[in-house]
Amino acid sequence: MMSKMENIAVIGAGMMGHGIAQSFIMGGYAVMLHDLHESILETAEAHIKNSLELFRRADLIAVEEIEKAMQRLTLTTDLKQAAQPANFIVEAIPEDLSLKQDVFCQIENHCDQNTIIASNTSSLKITDIGMRVKNKKRLVITHWFNPAQLVPTVEVVKGEQTSDEIIDITYNLLSKIEKAPVKIFKELPGFLVNRIQIALAREVLDLYEKGVASAADIDQAIRGSIGFRLASIGPLLTMDLGGLNIWFRVFENLLPDIQSSTAPPRALQKLVGEGHDGIKSGKGFFDYSMDFSKGELEDTIKQRDQEFLQRLKQLYRKTTS
Ligand SMILES: NC(=O)c1ccc[n+]([C@@H]2O[C@H](COP(=O)([O-])OP(=O)(O)OC[C@H]3O[C@@H](n4cnc5c(N)ncnc54)[C@H](O)[C@@H]3O)[C@@H](O)[C@H]2O)c1
């Protein structure tokens, strides 16, 4: 069906869109990045340039490749200009069903009938987003993780009418740009990864609420144990290595005591109710005017991104030298 895959369009150049566009230009594809205003596109372009420089410092891209990659990027406020030549389109506009439905219809009016249209939605169904699209077989979810240019996994989610061929083409395309796609065959809310993340967060917040340990120590405990391990091997292999009989016993002993509420955790309700949103408001589980000295938070985030890049290097053993 799809003879060649050359031109990519990314619709929405916000937090996710610019990272998705960067991944494709680094992978050798021409990308049209579309948003409503020039100023947003210019900010996105600056973010991409900064990030490419970090990739260069980590020896994950050669200096001459940066310029070539940037030449593959075109910014446009014209949806038609972005969609018309595209073989593959990723929508990354806000998480609003009716907005996404409208934009999908507009995209379909501008692009080829065989163009694959993917949504980066975190919580909606592609079957709902594409309700008014005529050719529904070519609709798919590609769920990237923030920062999209760094985190390898992309969930490729099949909608009710998505064809297997579209799933395979999407999977192969993402593999070619060195992401680590996974195929998800059922449109469950939260797909796969976010369901697990929420299950973990529910228990974390319950322990925090009960005062079992401080916020800093909870983070430290998880980073240095299951987080440390999960960066190298997955939960199922971990269980096999530990011995399933032991896991079975631990399940029997612990499950009755593990949090299973279906309401948002009380600790979160309280903080959000008091207007504490995390770094955006200056306070969350940590107080950013007291617990972090000047510049320490920025340094922590820089350090995180450098560690992500080092891990990417280990994963792909990729080097420019
Ligand atoms: N932020 C995350 O961590 C994350 C992770 C995975 C998936 N997602 C999903 O990705 C999507 C985008 O999220 P984000 O965090 O990048 O949002 P964002 O608000 O940072 O970016 C959205 C961009 O879309 C633009 N936009 C709005 N309406 C548009 C239109 N009609 N046409 C073109 N552009 C339009 C906005 O100007 C903005 O730049 C959402 O569906 C979100 O649920 C987000």
Image (tube, rainbow, N blue to C red):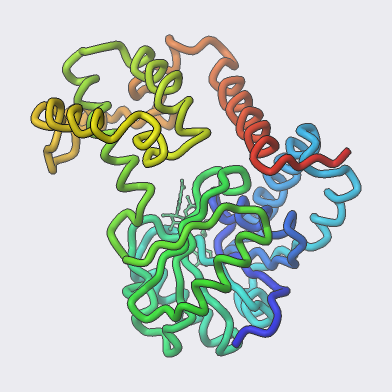
**Which quadrant of the view contains residue 39?**
bottom right
| Coordinates of residue 141 in the picture (x, y in percent) | 45, 66
Residue 93, visible in the rendered structure: no
79 left or right, relative to 204: right
263 left or right, relative to 195: left
Residue 67 in the image: above or below residue 243: below
Residue 152 in the image: above or below residue 241: below
| Coordinates of residue 73 in the picture (x, y in percent) | 75, 61
**Which quadrant of the view contains residue 254?**
top left
Q: Split into 4 quadrants, where in the image is the N terminus?
A: bottom right
Towards the viewer: 141 or 318:
318
| Coordinates of residue 301 in the picture (x, y in percent) | 57, 27
Towards the viewer: 241 or 49:
241
Total marks placed? 0
Q: Residue at point 64% right, 40% down? A: 315
**Which quadrant of the view contains residue 253?**
top left
Q: Split into 4 quadrants, where in the image is the C terminus?
A: top right
Q: Residue at point 49% right, 48% down? A: 145
9 left or right, relative to 59: left
Residue 304 in the image: above or below residue 113: above
Q: Residue at point 74% right, 54% down? A: 26
Q: Residue at point 35% right, 29% down? A: 242
| Coordinates of residue 251 in the picture (x, y in percent) | 18, 32
Towards the viewer: 116 or 312:
312
Q: Residue furthest left?
A: 256
Residue 87, visible in the rendered structure: yes
